Image (cartoon, rainbow, N blue to C red):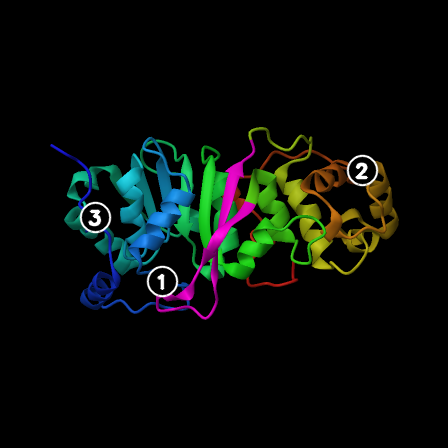
């Protein structure tokens, strides 16, 4: 007996609208809800993510289940994290109705993704998600920090945010998200998604970003929190030289210059020119540096989990 999903198991435009009507769901801007209504698009996302039959996938913001069903076609297991009460309540029934042969391989976590610190079942090996635009960067960083077993990530985000995540040193859009994502992974753009595959159609284009976790972490004696503090300070005043931008972080411009010289970085450079490794060297050279124990991700400072909407407040 075959356990392959039926060819019509995925949700189309009519299915999405019917489900939403039955549930009384009206997509809200507050939660960045734009539901994918095209089966070809979700299958493309799964292919681009290189989801394998042995993967345990975590999905953030599954909504009505379009991408969830496509992931279940291929992955061994899928765990979806959904904050919305109505959507979280309805999703298991949708999976059971449209893909009953895979329902036991699906789990739902009804929670804010930013507060999730553990998941049921085996550790996740992949993160695949259509992230709400207003919280995309903080959610991505939180998941990468909290679940080190995630080897591969593919997220769909606002095109502008995709550019910033994948930017390299020297790019005009290189900033806090770029450096922090690169702390965890090799990051690249993985495609573009048009507006017509969403309901409601957003007023911006979307992009896919691939993140493959580093096989070897950044070599540094500084903690992630120490490195990220330097990154936040450097981009808070990105038009200033690092000597000036890091004055508050170091205690004075003179102390900032000493740390920069010790790290082999020009005090006249700007944050947008530095690699994540160079930021780590600066953190190591911090004046009177101590090495505190790494705090839990849930205690991370708000600046580390900066919103993608905060342009140039990096």
Looking at the image, tell me whether mark 2 or mark 1 is earlier in sequence order: 1
Alpha-carbon neighbours of circle 3 within 10 Å: few (<14), some, or many (≥20)? many
Q: Magenta stretch?
A: 188-214
Q: Residue furthest right?
A: 254
Which quadrant of the structure image shows residue 287? top right
**Residue 200 magenta:** yes
Quadrant position of residue 183: top right
x and y percent of residue 269 in the render? 81, 50
Q: Nearest the camera: 94 or 212?
A: 212
State the residue in front, 178 or 242: 178
Q: Is 303 situated left or right of 146 in this image?
A: right
Instruction: Give me the disc on residue 263.
Output: 2
How far is the residue under mark 3 from the one under mark 1?
Answer: 21 Å
Q: Nearer the viewer, mark 3 or mark 1?
A: 1
Q: Residue at x 86, y 42 (%)?
A: 258
Q: CA distance from mark 2 to mark 1?
A: 48 Å
Residue 65 lies, in percent from the top left, at 28, 53
Neighbour tally class for label 1: few under 14, some 14-19, many 20 plus, Cα within 10 Å: some
Find disc 1 in the rendering and name its residue: 197
Q: Secondary structure at mark 1?
A: helix
Q: Position of residue 227 (x, y in %)?
A: 67, 42
Examine the rendered structure and indicate whether residue 97 appears above or below residue 101: below
- Residue at image point 21% right, 68% down: 21
Residue at the disc numbered 3: 95
The reply to whether residue 210 is in sight is yes
């Amino acid at each position: 007996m075959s356990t392959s999903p039926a060819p019509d198991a995925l949700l189309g435009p009519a299915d999405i609208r019917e489900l939403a009507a039955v549930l009384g769901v009206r997509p809200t801007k507050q939660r960045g809800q734009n539901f994918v209504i095209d089966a070809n698009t979700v299958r493309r996302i799964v292919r681009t993510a290189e989801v394998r039959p042995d993967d345990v996938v975590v999905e953030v913001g599954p909504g009505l289940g379009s991408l969830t069903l496509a992931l279940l076609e291929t992955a061994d297991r899928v765990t979806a994290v959904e904050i919305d009460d109505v959507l979280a309540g309805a999703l298991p029934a949708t999976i059971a109705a449209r893909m009953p042969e895979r329902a036991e391989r699906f789990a739902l976590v009804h929670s804010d993704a930013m507060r999730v610190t553990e998941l049921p079942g085996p550790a996740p090996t992949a993160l695949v998600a259509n992230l709400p635009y207003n919280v995309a960067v903080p959610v991505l960083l939180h998941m990468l920090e909290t679940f080190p077993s995630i080897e591969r990530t593919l997220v769909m985000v606002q095109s502008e945010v995709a550019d910033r995540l994948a930017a390299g040193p020297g790019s005009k859009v290189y900033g806090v998200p770029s450096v922090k994502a690169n702390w965890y992974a090799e990051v690249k753009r993985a495609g573009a998604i048009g507006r017509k595959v969403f309901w409601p159609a957003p007023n911006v284009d979307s992009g896919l970003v691939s993140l493959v976790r580093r096989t070897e972490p950044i070599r540094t004696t500084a903690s992630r929190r120490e490195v990220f503090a330097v990154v936040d300070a450097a981009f808070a005043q990105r038009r200033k030289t690092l000597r000036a931008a890091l004055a508050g972080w170091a205690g004075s411009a003179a102390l900032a210059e000493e740390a920069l010289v010790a790290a082999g970085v020009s005090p006249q450079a700007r944050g947008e020119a530095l690699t994540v490794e160079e930021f780590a060297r600066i953190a190591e050279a911090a004046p009177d540096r101590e090495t505190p124990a790494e705090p839990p991700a849930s205690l991370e400072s708000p600046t580390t989990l900066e919103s993608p909407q905060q342009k140039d407040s990096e």
